[in-house]
Amino acid sequence: MRRARPARKPLCTLATARPDPLGTAILALMTSHPLAFLVLFVAALWAGAQNQLAGGGSFLTLPALMLTGMDARVANITSTVALFPGQITGGWIGRRLAGGTETLSLTALTIISLIGGAIGALLLLATPSGIFARMVPWLVLFATGAFAWGSFGRKPKPTRVALGAVPAGAIQFAIAVYGGYFGGGIGFLMVTALTLSHVPVRAASATKNVLAGVMNATAVLVFLFSGEVRWLGAAIACIGALAGSIIGARLLRHINERVLRVVIVVIGAALTLGLFLRQP
């Protein structure tokens, strides 16, 4: 006699027998904060375009990531990772105009930026979340001030004597450490330092894009192994920022850059006020 074949389990039983923990977690997160993730995508889209047109995109991604439930330190780490591909793209496009100063080669500036960015990232990871949360309003205030000063202040004129290798290297190292730690306003800080080193403004702008990508490269590398990156938020912000970068590049000749800079300063000021008011 033939043995009776065991009855097949229904497909629904098989589907529920082995649930995917990662998929379940992502679905739960998306359904619990659907509006927050939509706001994050739109903010990242704007940030990508903003970075191409005038800079200051992190002022948009940081609060948007915090809206998804992240604390300030994790949001800062995730924002750095999410915006990194766009920074590398911008630095690569303008690499031919980049160069060193009269006393430091581009290679030397790159090495300094690599080391400083890594140190800044390690300092951020060593900072407890509670302490960083109390520091964030001051960091955003400083970054907003640097952005406003770089956008509307008097442009620094090259001095008769360029900065020497030691002071120029020390300034770039300090900027790189700050860039790996927080990063808001580093572009204007670097342009100022490079201008004081007798680098033409156009070359200084290209050089700061390259160095910003370099210092964030080591910071991102540190963050990747930290376990602090929230990958769902990073992926959404990264896709939005890359799409925004393409849009921003096409709108470059049609948008009033000064208006965009005013908008970012207003956002930075509002964010600073809001963060101060949120503190206990």
Image: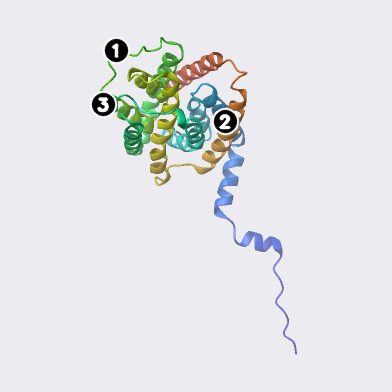
Give amino acid for label 2: Ser
Does residue 118 appear to the left or right of 42 in the view shown?
left
Q: Secondary structure at mark 2?
A: helix
Q: Which quadrant is home to the C terminus?
A: top left
**Picture residue at 59% right of the left edge, 39% below the top:** 32
Mark with earlier residue (2, 3): 3
Q: Quadrant of residue 232?
A: top right
**Picture residue at 34% right of the left edge, 18% below the top:** 198
Farthest residue, direction bottom: 1
**Picture residue at 35% right of the left edge, 33% below the top:** 113
Picture disc at residue 165: 3
Other residues around mark 2 within 10 Å, as few (<14) / some (14–19) / many (≥20): many
Q: Which residue is mark 2?
A: 245
Q: Secondary structure at mark 1?
A: loop
Q: Which quadrant is home to the N terminus?
A: bottom right
Residue 115: image location, x then y, percent: 32, 37
Q: CA distance from mark 2 to mark 3?
A: 35 Å
Mark 3 and mark 2 in contact (Cβ < 8 Å)? no
- Report if residue 279 is visible in the image: no
Residue 19: image location, x then y, percent: 59, 57
- Report if residue 235 is visible in the image: yes
Q: Which residue is mark 1?
A: 160
Residue 74: image location, x then y, percent: 43, 37
Q: Quadrant of residue 252?
A: top right
**Picture residue at 37% right of the left edge, 18% below the top:** 195
Other residues around mark 3 within 10 Å, as few (<14) / some (14–19) / many (≥20): some
Give amino acid for label 3: Ala
Q: Secondary structure at mark 3?
A: helix
Q: CA distance from mark 1 to mark 2?
A: 38 Å
Does residue 33 appear to the left or right of 80 in the view shown?
right
Q: CA distance from mark 1 to mark 3?
A: 16 Å
